[in-house]
Each structure stands twice: as C-alpha cells, then as structure tokens.
Amino acid sequence: MPKLLFEFDSNRRFYRNKGLKANQAAPENGMRVILSESGMSEHIYNFSAGPAMIPAEVIAEAAAELASVRGSGLSVMEISHRSALFGEILEDALDRVRRLLNLPESYEVLFLQGGATLQFSMVPMNLLAPVDTAEYVVTGYWGKKAAKIASRYGEIKTIYSAEDKGFTAVPANGELRVSPNASYLHYTSNETIDGVEFDYDVDAGLIPVVCDMSSNILSRPIDIEKYGLIYAGAQKNLGPSGLVLVVIRKDLLDRSPRELPDLLTYKVLADNNSMANTPNTWAIYMLGLVCKWLEARGGPAGIDKLNEEKARLLYEAIDKSDGFYAGHAERTARSRMNVTFKLPNAELDAMFVKGSEENGMNGLAGHRAVGGIRASIYNAMPISGVKHLVEFMAEFARKNG
Ligand SMILES: Cc1ncc(COP(=O)(O)O)c(C=O)c1O
C-alpha cells in the first residue's frame, strides 16, 4: 500500500507533502489519507455510511490550515462565531449551498444542530397544527422513524409503505395520491440503510413537499422548487457530523407556532442567520470546503455522471455473480449512494468484511438492523475505490463461490 503522502511538523502548523505543493494536495487517485502519529500515512477506501468519507483534497486543505485558518494565526475552532473572519466563512458556505442547489431568493438556508433526527420532530412542530394531517411516504428505516416521531405532534397518514416488501421498493413517478388538505408530504429521497432511492423529485402540486435528503443531497441535480423544505445531516455528502442543512421556502416560516422554544423555531433560526446560539463553526467551515470541492467538479450535474458510473459498476458486479451476491433493492429502486447486498450466508458476509479490511477498505458491514454488506459510495468516493471493491468481490466469489 502506498505510504507517506502527507507530513506535518510536530506542532502540525506546517503541511508538506511528497511531490505535491501544499493546498493543491490531491493524492493521485483521491484515496482517503490516514495520518498516524509518526506522520506516516496510508490509504484506505472508506465505504462507511456516515460519518462518511470526506474528499481527500478537503481533508488535506483543512489539515493545512488547521492551526491557522486563512492565514489568521488562529484555528477555525478557536475564533468567535461573531468575528468578521467567521462571518466570511459562514457567508461563503451559505453562498456555495445556494449556488449548488440553484436556490431562488424565496428559500432560506439554515445550518442547525441536532442532526436529521431532530428534524423528524422540528418539521411537524413547525409545519403541522395538532388538528391537521401530514402525509408520509415510508420506503425504509428512516422514513418509518420520521413518521413515528411526527405522530406525537399531529395526525400522520402513511400514504405509501414498502415495509411489506422488506423496504426494497419506491413508488413509481406519478403513483402517489396526496390529499389536497395535507399540511405537507414527507419522504426520504434515499434510504441509507435499505439502499433504495427515488430517481425523481416527488411532485405534490400545491402541497409542500418535505424531504429527508441526508444521504443523497447534491449527488444529482434536483428541482428545488418542487420542495417546501429539505434537510440533510452533513455527515454523508456535506462534511462532518454535528451539522444539519435545512432549506426552507420562506412562506413556510410563518407557520411556526409561537410557543415553541427559539432553537426549535425555523423563523427564529432564519431571523438570526443560523446563529441564534453558537453554531458548529468547524462543521460549517468543512461544509464550505466540501461545497468548494464539489463546485470545482461541476456541482451536482458534474458529479451525477460519476455517481451513475460508480453505481453501475457495483450493480453489474452483483448481477454478474450468478447469485453469489444478492442485491437487496428492486432494480428500479436501487440506490446510487448505498449499495446493499448479501452473500449466501452470514458467515460469508463476515468473511467478506474481514477480507475487505485486509485489502484496504473500511465500513462495508451492513447496518445492524439488516445485516449483509453495504457499500456507501457518496460523492467523495473516487471511481478507483469502486473498481478496487469490484475486483475484491470477483476474487472473493471465485475463492468462496
Ligand atoms: C436518511 C437519513 N435520515 C436521518 C438520519 C439520522 O441522522 P442523524 O444521525 O444526523 O440524526 C440518517 C443517518 O444516517 C439518514 O441516513
């Protein structure tokens, strides 16, 4: 395995790398860089579902200015969130999100805490009056959880559930029938655990669509104007954990009931530009770097083709394995971000995971709720990582099939 691409001096203030100039650091093939105490580094392809791989170039850039952000002599983690410098970092990150999502002025961008899980409560607390009904589409573990939590705050009607199919399917485009009286329609565009994904934006006409995009945000272009609110935990396609992105259509800000705590009220958070209290400054900074990285690759439209190709390679490996690898999702619902499959038995699953770790890969064990294998191939995963996995799969099947 290649070693020693990056080096830091003892106080980590200075960054050097072998044969590459600082700040333009790109390990040859975008592999994840691991820094050990000795300053040695080795490459590992990280297939973890989240917190997930962050682009190697972003890790290198953040490392290079860890102790002195933008040449200030201070770390981004030790400056005031009210400082001019952090103000610039925040505005830069907000602008990049606006550009990448092609947001009209009628939408507000919020950087919040509490993860996507808190949004399961905040959405109904703000948008659903106790006497009204919200409709939910349940295509996996997270959508089911969102619906269950929402039912504490008002009437919830599940208008589509794929639970009886073992969460292997999503509704066809146009299949959903949304009531004209619903307060909103909620769905999960990519189910991270089950590995099923919508390949279209759900259209509910005049009913606001709320979408949990935690695990496929910015992986393809979307028509944002179809949505009233989208949210995404940052730790898959946007940066580190501890930050959740919420994009909300401004007219919906007026729905929040007055008696909610400030930090749970979208309107208050929007009025305070995401700084009603001290925000996660580090995660916002990292999100800005990830967005910059994505913009340099053509944004969602640019990365879309690469994501398509990565997923195609993996599903082809599954489909051509004569049943040794069994994909979980129906073909029409296959996720491009989380590829879930099983080997003939749990013992082989475990051997596969162990073998993958010995071959420079990490995070391939399926979620504890479903078992099997899950390869998470978010935006940051280079195609070389997918090819490496595909080769390993072929070799493993040949030896154990
Ligand atoms: C689709 C989806 N929704 C919600 C969550 C929960 O996110 P958090 O742990 O940030 O609350 C996850 C986490 O993996 C997820 O994948």
Image (cartoon, rainbow, N blue to C red):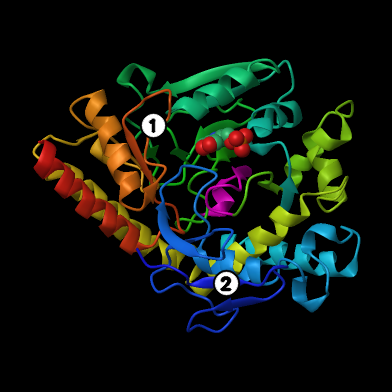
Which residue bears the numbered disc 2? Answer: 7
Residue 176: percent from the left, percent from the top?
A: 42, 30
Residue sitting at x 66%, y 60%: 286
Q: Give above or below for 11 relative to 331.
A: below
Which of the two residues, 190 or 101, is positioned nearer the viewer here? 190
In the rendered structure, the answer to whether residue 193 lies left or right of residue 80 reads: left
Who's the residue at 39% across and 51% down the image? 377
**In the image shown, does 241 or 333 lie closer to the viewer?**
241
Badge 2 marks a residue whose secondary structure is strand
Which one is in front, 15 or 62?
15
Residue 372: x, y in percent?
A: 31, 30
Spot occupied by residue 50 in the image (x, y as percentages of width and height):
52, 43
Direction from residue 27 to residue 67 in the image, left or right: right
Q: Is residue 380 left or right of residue 281?
A: left
Which residue was labeled with disc 1?
194
- The disc labelled 1 sits on which kind of residue? Asp
Q: Quadrant of ligand 1?
A: top right
**Where residue 325 is drawn, which disc sits there?**
none
- Residue located farthest toward the front when viewing the structure as drawn: 38
Q: Please state the horizontal and vertical placement of residue 225, each as a whole percent of the image.
A: 58, 52
**Which class describes the residues within 10 Å of circle 1: few (<14), some (14-19), or many (20+)?**
many
- Within the image, what quadrant is residue 130 found in? top right
Q: Which residues are magenta?
A: 223-238
Give the structural element (helix, strand or loop) at label 1.
loop
**Which comes before the other along the chain, label 1 or label 2?**
2
Q: Which residue occupies 55% across, 58% down?
A: 36
Quarter holding residue 44: bottom left
Q: Is residue 382 magenta?
A: no
Report crowding for label 2: few under 14, some 14 to 19, many 20 or more residues within 10 A (C-alpha).
some
Q: Is residue 391 above or below residue 292?
A: above
Q: Amino acid at mark 2?
A: Glu
